[in-house]
Image (spheres, rainbow, N blue to C red):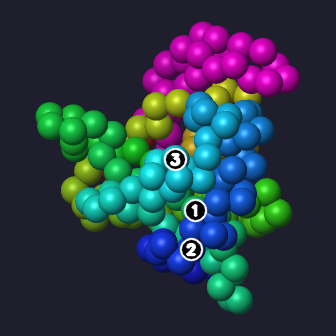
Amino acid sequence: MLIRNATTDDWPAIWPFLHQIVAAGETFPYPLDLDEDQGRAMWMVPDPGRTVVATDDTGAVLGTANMYANRSGNGSHIASASYMVDPDHQGRGVGRALCEDSLTWARAAGFRAMVFNAVVETNLHAVRLYESLGFTVLGTVPEGFRHPEKGYVGLHMMHRPL
């Protein structure tokens, strides 16, 4: 697996699974009716942030991540990131590789910590992955996320020092 900076040429491979994941409404607090232009503007973050893709040896996109300062100004020393793995490629370590890459990027860029502001508590694969990489749940907004099947569930804030 290769993780590299995403280009505009990667967007046609990212959009189908990003759209599928967002429209399912189970793991991201994004508008369910997100259109392609909105999705591209939201996901393909500009410098000094970074958007990457994970590809296999044929160049097929397996997943993507974006990373950036969580806040501007006096909060700009804390990083954040989001990850999406094509459902056809889950269970192959793509999410872990993307998360590890973002941690490496954040350290090299001089961030002091990484925080995830909105991890859906029922997204157990993500919660377990982040915990295995040293993140802890700082707190949970009760009923902070409206899951399409489970109703109102908690939304975790997770943190890891760098």
In this figure, which residue is indicated by the disc labeled 2?
Answer: 10
User: Where on the picture, by quarter, is residue 123?
Assistant: top right
Q: Element at badge 2?
A: helix
What residue sits right under mark 1 in the picture?
Answer: 64
Q: Residues within 10 Å of mark 1 (few under 14, many from 20)?
A: many
Secondary structure mostly seen in magenta is: strand
Label 1 sits on what residue type?
Thr
* 2 and 3 marks in contact (CB < 8 Å): no
The quadrant holding residue 57 is bottom right
SS for callout 1: strand
**Extent of the magenta region:** 132-159
Q: How far apart, in angstroms, are the residues tagged by discs 3 and 1?
A: 17 Å
Q: Which mark is residue 97?
A: none
Q: CA distance from mark 2 to mark 1?
A: 10 Å
Single out the mark in the foreground, 2 or 3: 3
Residue flagged by tag 2: what amino acid is it?
Answer: Asp
Asked if the residue under mark 1 is in contact with the one under mark 2, i.e. CB atoms within 8 Å, the reply is yes
- The disc, 3 or 1, on the residue closer to the chain's N-terminal end is 3
Check disc 3 and report the residue beneath it.
Answer: 38
> Does residue 110 appear to the left or right of 125 in the view shown?
left
